[in-house]
Image (cartoon, grey):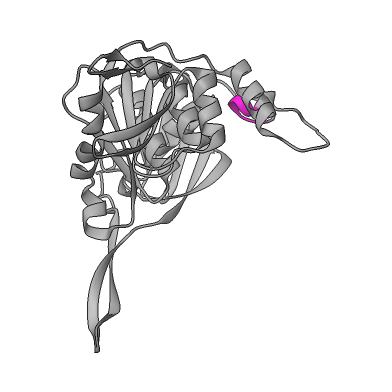
Amino acid sequence: MDVQPAPSRTGQQRVQISRIQGNAVGPAFDEVAREEALQLMVNSQPLAILLRTPGSDLELALGLLHAEGVVARLAEIASVRIAPSGQRDLHFPQLELELDPEAENLVDVKLRAPLPDGGLGWQRALPSSSACGICGAATLEALQRFQDPVEGDFIWPIERIFRLPEMLAASQRVFSSTGGLHAAGLIAWDGSSMVVAEDVGRHNAVDKLVGRALAEGRLPLTNSAMVVSGRAGFEIVQKAAAAQVALVASISAPSSLAVQTAELLGVTLIGFLRGERCNVYSRPDRVGAPGGPVAG
């Protein structure tokens, strides 16, 4: 089908508001972050509904499927049906894209093999029943059985780590006008520029980064670092580790399960990265201080 790409929706929307400044009240306009539901399908079967910021629907879908263990390599994908309005970048030569204007807020990833029954990826290894439910220990045990540890061994100079939040903020295009989006940035050890994704969901931003790398044939992301604008929870670390990202840094706090996951999978986890200070929670040997690698 010969379809001309339609302009994608931007990540922001202009709304009319009432603005109060001191004792003055008057009409005004404001830019808010766009949030819409996306139907993710695999082999034309509904899989999940995601709340996201439109514009990188392809990357979001592929990143989520990679993190969940559904897609490991680009060769496993036969084609992707997507509405051009939900995708800014349509130049992925290694992917067969079916542009369907009627597929609004929908991505259908068609695999060369059927989807397995039961849970996805590492979640298939979780116990099916338990008197105490699914606890952190069960989650880590299931993850260890499914996911390989991270192998990157490059040492990141602390001066370069300190610059990561500034590099991320400089590339947050939609956040600068709305103040309402999370962001994740990815940089290679030998690179000078950062690839950034924004979304109303912090996990979505990470999925978009990994999904773009998958679509471009750049996985695994060995010896790369990721910086996130929000809290570093379990899912952030798990998604990064699935892509073999060796270092994850957050300007905020990590959770206890995130720290345990980072230790289990060999991820260097950094929190409270602000100015020239940070906390290193796991694998400090990848952090290069003036006197050499940080001791564990």
Q: Is residue 120 magenta?
A: yes
Instruction: Tell me if residue 97 can be seen.
Output: no
Q: Is residue 137 left or right of residue 191?
A: right
Q: Is residue 253 above or below residue 191?
A: below
Residue range of the region highlighted in magenta in the rendering: 119-123
Q: Position of residue 186 (x, y in %)?
A: 29, 29
Position of residue 32 relative to residue 69, above or below, is below
Magenta-drawn stretch contains 292: no
In this picture, residue 46 sits left or right of residue 58 = right
Q: Quadrant of the N terminus?
A: top left
Q: Nearer the viewer, residue 27 or 150?
A: 150
| Relative image position of residue 29 (x, y in whole percent) | 23, 74
Residue 206 percent location from the top left of the image: 39, 36
What residue is rendered at 27% in x and 50% in y? 8
The reply, left or right, for residue 134 in relation to residue 233 is: right
Q: Of helix, strand and loop, which mostly describes the magenta segment?
A: helix
Task: State the residue lying farthest toward the left.
Answer: 192
Q: Quadrant of residue 34?
A: bottom left
Q: Nearer the viewer, residue 21 or 244?
A: 21
* Residue toward you, 135 or 56: 135
Task: Tell me how many marks there are.
Answer: 0
Q: Camera-side residue: 20 or 281?
A: 281
Examine the rendering and report whether any part of residue 155 can be seen: yes
Q: Position of residue 221 (x, y in %)?
A: 35, 19
Who's the residue at 37% across and 24% down the image?
247
The image quarter containing residue 74 is top left
Q: Residue furthest right?
A: 131
Q: Quadrant of residue 187?
A: top left
